[in-house]
Amino acid sequence: MTSSHDIEEYILSHIDPEGDYLHRLWRATNIHLLAGRMASGHLQGRLLKMLVRMMAPRRILEVGTFGGYSAICMAEGLEPGGVVYTFEIDDELEDFTRPWIENSPVADRIRLIIGDAITEAPKLGIAFDLVFLDGDKRTYLQAYEMALKVTAPGAFIIADNTLWDGHVTDTAYAHDAQTKGVRDFNDFVAGDPRVEKVILPLRDGLTLMRKTDGGRKTAPDFEK
């Protein structure tokens, strides 16, 4: 029987290479940062680049920079003049992440901003064509509502980690705040007519959404 590891290795050997710079960033992230596995990695990184190529956005908003891997991958897919605005709320990550972004081959296409995207991104006054949600799972619904406000119909929203290591179907994690945040997000989006949506079982789950002119739905009140 073929193992999932064998399948993954087969896939990685049959897609575009990761590239030396991204590989070194991946290694550094796993060595120097806690929970380094949160970085997108080879397969998801190549998918993000391909999606950007297909969607052809001019302005991308990323919620949750972490080590900068996904921001660089999306920037690789941009046409000249396109920009990724990536927000990281944890200022302790800046000393690691900023040099990796600023020394990357696509540094001119990335703007790293330290702060809370939920409150700060709307202040930029930019209409984004693509939003990538990959921040705190406890605030995914708030980030989603923000994303809908800063995009026009036809824009795309991608949410990472929406299967959350399978915990979304495991009752043992019913009271875990992060798991609850992902479940609440998934349940809400499933019934939201403002977006078309599909979940891909890639790595930790990736939800692709397209904003429509559909009906209105108001998210529940959030705890302060």
Image (cartoon, rainbow, N blue to C red):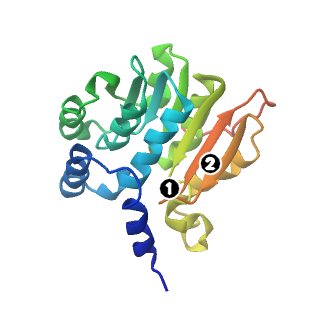
Residue 201 at least partly seen: yes
- Label 1 vs label 2: CA separation? 11 Å
**Which residue is most to the bottom?**
1
Identify the mark nearer the N-term, 1 or 2: 1
Tag 2's secondary structure? helix
Q: Nearer the viewer, residue 181 or 55?
A: 55
Residue 18 position in % (x across, y down): 31, 50
- Residue in the picture at 57% in, 22% down: 150
Above or below 39: residue 167: below
Q: Nearer the viewer, residue 40 or 139?
A: 40
- Residue in the picture at 64% in, 40% down: 209
**Which residue is most to the front?**
14
Residue 12 relative to residue 224: left or right: left
Answer with the quarter of the image where residue 99 lies. Answer: top left
**Kind of residue at disc 2:** Phe
Residue 110 position in % (x across, y down): 33, 26
Q: Nearer the viewer, residue 219 or 54?
A: 54
Q: Which residue is mark 1?
A: 178
**Kind of residue at disc 1:** Gln
- Answer few, some or many: residues within 10 Å of disc 1's Cα (few below 14, many 20 plus, some between 14 and 19): some
**Which residue is most to the right?**
215
Above or below 91: residue 137: below
- Answer few, some or many: residues within 10 Å of disc 2's Cα (few below 14, many 20 plus, some between 14 and 19): many
The C terminus - image quarter: top right
Residue 215 position in % (x across, y down): 81, 31
Residue 109 relative to residue 222: left or right: left
Q: Which residue is mark 2?
A: 185
Residue 15 relative to residue 93: left or right: right
Front: mark 1 or 2:
2
Residue 179 relative to residue 100: left or right: right
